Image: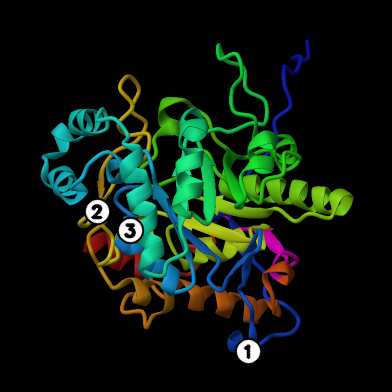
Amino acid sequence: MPIRQFRDMRRCYGFEEVAIVPGDITVNPEQTSTDLRLGNLTFPVPILAAAMDAVVDPRFAVAFSKLGGLAVLNLEGVQARYEKPDEILAEIAEVPIKQTTPLLQKVYTQPIKEKLVGERIREIKSKGGICAVSVTPANTKKLTSVIVEAGADVLVVQSTVTTARHVSKSLKGLVFSELCRTVPIPVVVGNAVSYSAALELMKTGIAGLLVGVGPGATCTTRQVLGIGVPQVTATMDCAAARDEYFKKNGKYVAIITDGGIHAGSDLCKAFAAGADAVMLGAILAKAEEAPGRGYHWGMASPHPALPRGRRIKVDTQAPLQQILFGPATVSDGTQNLVGALRTAMGVCGAATIAQMHDVEMVVAPSIRTEGKSWQFQQACSQ
């Protein structure tokens, strides 16, 4: 007897399974525009630094802003819990690996202090930086007024999975449409991976959407919960929702691919898949200006009952400017990220990010290994 099919499943793709096809014409990379628009703000570098304690502190946020990108400060991390966060960051970096999770759980039990929230935002603004901050839905209502009064420029509301409709015991939870109407700054939410969830979130009035569940270098959501969609497919689906929403409503919502980007090749593929920007964590944690001291850990690592993340060693490798603009001193694609994007755009004949969305992509699971036997032999011997 034929076996009855229980459920249809489609094939989805990650960065390592696809490749970008060169265009029929080429453009000088210096003539490409990589501008990102977020509400009324424009950023020449379409990269957001992830809201993780090992990546962004006020000093890093200012430096990143002056280079043209947007760093997001985690307002539920050590910066908003401790008067002297550097001491805590040093302790996390120095603890033996087997003691990392218990320490993180202990460190993040300290309450968030509204006083520190305002101080960190004002510190970034006073030094000339554009300030973006991140909170979870549970703390958004409580902290929004402090965030706005302190002068933040962008509000990011972020959780592992975000939807426009949420069932809870609360009589009235966070309603994104109300938040977007009352907050006078662009609101970015995340994370989502599907067309339908993205479209519903866009209808609430958000300015940007973070795309990605579980692909981050420190994240173990896929391992612990089994939840996630490979980033190329997730980006394409959410970008399709963006285009549909723009067609019907005339408002453009930025798609920001968040997680899974380990090198310039992944970054370029994210834009070809439809991203307007990317959010980076581990690559930027390697910067000399990063507060993690050569380590990186995820936002869900300190969960008291189900930690979904771990501390990883990334090493301090180069100044932030070198990681973004070169010159690269390594050949693995982790430096000169903006240069890689401009070069890929030029090779594809894309003068703008919008044109990069139209380039051809192909399924190519051997793209990283084809003809590279010598490179892999040498890598394995090191």
- Disc 2 marks which amino acid? Gly
Q: Earlier in the sequence, mark 1 or mark 3?
A: 1
Q: Where is residue 150 in the image (x, y as percent from the top left)?
A: 44, 51
What amino acid is found at the position of numbered circle 1 in the picture?
Asn
Residue extent of the magenta highlight: 356-365
Badge 2 is on which residue?
292
Question: Which residue is at 69% across, 79% downward?
Answer: 351
Callout 2: few (<14), some (14-19), or many (20+) C-alpha neighbours within 10 Å?
A: many
- Which is more toward the observer, 371 or 328? 328
Q: Which residue lies under the disc numbered 1?
A: 28
Q: Is residue 168 left or right of residue 77?
A: right
Residue 177, above or below 274: above
- Which residue matches tag 3? 58
> Is 371 within the magenta?
no
Name the quadrant of the C terminus.
Answer: bottom left
Apparent side of residue 250 relative to residue 137 in the rendered image (left or right): right
- Three-letter code, disc 3: Pro
Secondary element type, mark 1? loop
Position above or below: 29 against 180 = below
Nearest to viewer (mark 1 / mark 3):
3
